[in-house]
Image (cartoon, helix red, strand yellow):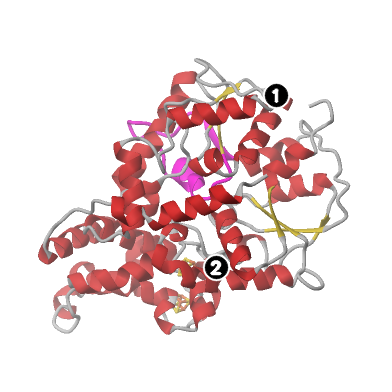
Amino acid sequence: MIDMNVFHGFLEAIRHLPEMAQPPQMGDAQRVERAKAVMRAKMDRGLALDLEACVHCGYCSEACHFSQSTGDPKYAPNRKLDLLRRFHARETSAFAPVKRLFVRDITADDLREFQELCFDSCTECGRCSMVCPMGINTARGVNVMREALYEAGLAPLELTAVAQEQAGRGTVFGVGPQELRQAVEAIRAEGIAVPLDEPQADVLLVTTVIDVLLYRDAFAATARILNHLGLRWTLRSAGFEAANFGLLAGSESLQAEASRRLVDEALAIGARTVILPECGHAYPALRWDATREDGSALPFEVLAVSEFVGREVTAGRLRLRPSSDRGTYTYHDACKLARHGGVMEEPRAALKALGVDFRETEPTAQRNWCCGGGAGAFLINRAGSLRHQAWEIKREQIEATGAATGADTVVVSCASCRLNFMAGAEQDAWPVRIASLVELAAQQLPVDA
Ligand code: SF4
Ligand code: SF4
C-alpha cells in the first residue's frame, strides 16, 4: 500500500533540492574551456560519425515524446546535438581549420541554453535512434553533453544536489544505512526474513531510496521471492543504493564512485549475482558501465529484478499461482531496461504466469513510448509541465489498449516511471491502477511461501 503522504513529501523534498546544491563557481571562459575538454575527450569515431551523418529527414522528431507532445521544433532530437556538432566542426572534424572560418564558437550562454535541451527534454530514451535512417545515437551524444555541462557547473541544481549528497555523505534524500535498517526491521515485522550484512552470500540484493521510503512493498516482495527460491542472499548496509545520480547528473567520476560501493560489497561477500530493484537507470549504471577497480569485467552477473523473476519463471523454478483478477493489464517498458537493455521477454513471461488478461500497447517493447520521467527528468522542477505533456502520449497509448480508459492496470518495473505515472495520474485524475511487477509476482507465490 503506497502512503500518498510519503509520495507528496517526496515531491516537496524535490522542490527544495536546488537550495542544497553547491555547483562549482567559475567564470564563463572556464565553463567553456571545461565543457570543450569533455567534448574533445569523448569525441571518438562513432560520435563523430553521428554528428556528421544527419540528413535532416525529421523522422526522429516523430519518435521523440518531447518533440511530439509540444510540437516545438527546438525539441527535435537532432537539434539537441547542435552544440556538439558545432564543436566538432570547429575543432575535431577533418576540415576544422576551414570550418572555423564560418562556424560560430561555443559560448557559456550556448551551454546554458542547452541545459534544458539535454536534461529537461531528453530522457536518453533512445527511441529516436530506432527510426533514424542513419542510425544516429542521439542519446549517447546527449549524455556527452550532460557530462560537458556538469563539468562546466551547469547541470540542473536538483541533480547536482543529489549527486553531491550521494558522493559526499553516501546518502540519497537522507537515506543511509540507518534508514535501510529501519526499513528492514519494518519488513521483518511483517514476518518476512531479510538477511542484512551477511558476510557471505550468493546473491546481493540492492535497493533504492524510493523503495526504502515509498515503494517498500516492492522491496518486501523481492525479499519474499528470494526467500521462496531458497537463495542465500543478503543486503549490505555499506552499499545498497542502486540509484546512481552521478550518471544522471553527467559526472563520470561520481557515477563510478556510486557503482564502486555496490561492486565492493558484491566482491566482499563473493556474490555470483547482483539483483537490482525496479529502477531503470540502475541497470546501465551497474550492468553496462561498471567495472572492477582495475577496469576488468565484473565477476558476477547483474540482473534487474523483473529480468530475474521472468528468468526464474521461464526456468520453472518460480511457479506463480494464476491471479483471480479478471481485469485487463498492460505493461510499460522502461527505456533503460527494454530499449537499452533488452529486458523485454522476461517481464512478459512473469505477466503470462499470472494468467491475467494482458494487452500489449501499440507500439510495444523496444519501440514503446517513454513515460517522460526518466534519466533524472522527474527531479527537475521547472520540467514539470514539459514532462506532463510527454506523459500524455503514454497515457493515450495505454487508453488505446481497450475500451474507455484501456487496461485497468498498467504494470511498471521502474520506480522512476512509477513516480512519473503517479504524478501524471494524480494531475489528470486518471483511474488506471499503476502496479509493480515484482509486487504482483510476490502476491501470486504459492500459499505456503
Ligand atoms: S532521424 Fe536521424 S538523420 Fe533524420 S533528422 Fe533525425 S538524427 Fe537526422
Ligand atoms: S533519446 Fe528520447 S528523449 Fe532524447 S531526443 Fe531521442 S527520443 Fe527524445
- Which quarter of the image is occupied by the N terminus? top right
User: Residue under circle 2?
Assistant: 130
Is 185 colored magenta in this rendering?
no
User: Residue under circle 1?
Assistant: 191
Q: Of the residues tagged 2 and 1, which is closer to the observer?
A: 1
- Disc 1 under 8 Å from ligand 2? The reply is no
Secondary structure character of the magenta stretch overall: loop
Residue at image x 27%, y 56%? 150
Q: Quadrant of residue 430?
A: bottom right
Asked if marks 2 and 1 touch (Cβ < 8 Å), the reply is no
Residue at image x 36%, y 48%? 162
Nearest the viewer among 176 and 277 is 176
Residue at image x 46%, y 62%? 123
Nearest the viewer among 161 and 199 is 161
The image position of residue 76, as x and y in percent, is 44, 78
Residue at image x 39%, y 80%? 74
Tag 2: amino acid: Met
The image position of residue 406, as x and y in percent, is 77, 68
| Callout 2 secondary element | helix
The span from disc 2 to disc 1 (Cα, nearest Å) is 46 Å
Report whether residue 88 is seen. no
**Which residue is situated farthest in the top direction here?**
199
Report whether residue 446 is seen. yes
28 left or right, relative to 414? left
The image position of residue 275, as x and y in percent, is 57, 35
Span shown in magenta: 277-304
Q: Quadrant of residue 19?
A: bottom left
Residue 416 image label:
none
Q: How many marks?
A: 2
Above/below status of 291 relative to 16? above
Q: Residues within 10 Å of mark 1 (few under 14, many from 20)?
A: few
Tag 1: amino acid: Gly
